[in-house]
Image (spheres, rainbow, N blue to C red):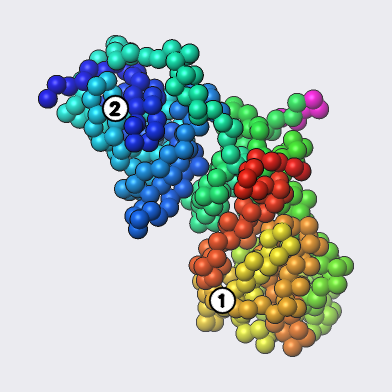
Amino acid sequence: MNKVVVGSEEWCSFPELGIPTIKARVDSGAKTSALHAINIAPFIKNESSWVKFDINPIQNNSKTIIHCEAPLIDKRIVKSSSGFREQRYVIQTNLKIGDATWPIEVTLTNRDTMGFRMLLGREAMSGRVLVDPEQQFLLGQPTNDSLKEIYKNSEKAPSGLRIGLLASNPELYSNKRIMEAGEMRGHEMHFLNIKECYIKLDAKKPEIHYRGGKILNEFDAIIPRIRPSITFYGCALTRQFEALNVFCLNSSTAITQSRDKLFSLQLLLHSGIGIPTTGFANSPLDTDDLIKMVGGSPLIIKLLEGTQGKGVVLAETKKAAESVINAFKSLNANILVQEFIKEANGKDIRCFVIDGKVVASIQREAMPGEFRANIHLGGTASIIKATSEEKKIAIKAAKAMDLKVAGVDIIRSTKGPLLLEVNSSPGLEGIETATNKDIAGEMIKAIEKNFKLDAANPKSKEQ
């Protein structure tokens, strides 16, 4: 077989994908070949797995777009030269380089930050190609004018929105699902690691930078998913995006107040929402009356800064309650003391509210011997039909906290439904698994609704 001789850079094409020409970096040091792709979405065609994606085949040109689809042959973890690990879709398609054509495997990934839209790895070249690394474009290269002519019918504005997911862990179920749901609905999704963002405060030109000095601009929307331990920094970044007139699915103010358990309970009560009787005191000298105030033992003691059930203690007796309260006080911790709703039997109801509607409800049940129903603590989730009163409370609570997305926890008591807590970054795994509903998709729809997007004109942004 005559081998094709190539330089370190060559132009090639993918006839089956409708890509007439694309510049590739020839890299025998890389095992796998990679093709630039955005809006990647798997789908079923003739009972087989396929993937559709968009490509901007010309570097630094986001206007030229080709819509592609190909059979999906694998999903695999690929480690980049910088050590970053990423799960990618793998397709098989014909590569044409010079006069030769043969099938190769290609992984799909966003190569916006790379110098080349295509990387040709050694697996695709094995037995067919000889590389002369000192040469370039041995098989010819198109001029700018001929490129324009080749791609004249592909010039179109990108569809969909540019959405950033501001979070900490790209491998978390909730974050992966949100990225996937945005891409499935035709948006350009970017994962923004909170710790890798930093801000420039400037009256004329405020900016948000990403590690390496990249300026984060031209985002249409941001979905903040801020873990409690970095509330302050995460909300500072969200506020900066708001200053740049970027739509944030939950506002920095709403997230900040939802993280303050005491303030949020005061806001909820102000809106007429019932909660278990709760006490808050500063001095250990008031412990005795504090315990009486909430109906005596058993009672719940909560750290104001706790999350996912951490920092929540059930004190069975008055003596135990006094010990725990005074221990927390000696550490200068702020705590709430709350009546224990025994009849709830370790169960609570999580209503997921998006844009003023309850989109799903589950019942969470604590493990045997445990009173906290959090899924993170081994609680189990099952489908439940929330009553109209419970739905009203959930919607009212999200509105009182000014949250577009909220996980509202309600407990059933002899006094009727009582509100326990409102979460501004509720997890999706428990509720999606139990209900089989596309909650992540509903979050993306809430952003589309804000921009008044319609199918005919996906970029008709109105705020």
Q: Residue furthest right?
A: 270
Residue 269 versus residue 197 in the image, above or below: below
Quarter holding residue 6: top left
Looking at the rendering, in which quadrant would you find the N terminus?
A: top left
458 falls in the magenta region: no
Question: Looking at the magenta stretch, what is its main secondary structure?
Answer: loop
Residue 383 tag number: 1
Q: Nearer the viewer, residue 406 or 461?
A: 461
- Residue shown at 42%/24% (left/top)? 116
Quarter holding residue 409: bottom right
Residue 131 percent location from the top left of the image? 24, 19
Q: SS of the residue at dot 1?
A: strand
Within-10-Å neighbours for mark 1: few <14, some 14–19, many 20+: some
Residue 425 tag number: none
Left or right, 66 with respect to 9, comes to right
Q: Is residue 305 visible?
A: no
Within-10-Å neighbours for mark 2: few <14, some 14–19, many 20+: some
Residue 361 percent location from the top left of the image? 62, 72
- The label nearer to you, 1 versus 2, is 2
Left or right, 38 with respect to 357, comes to left
Residue span colored magenta? 200-204
Q: CA distance from mark 1 to mark 2?
A: 52 Å
Q: SS of the residue at dot 2?
A: strand
Q: Amino acid at mark 2?
A: Lys
For disc 2, the marked residue is: 96
- Residue shown at 54%/56% (left/top)? 174
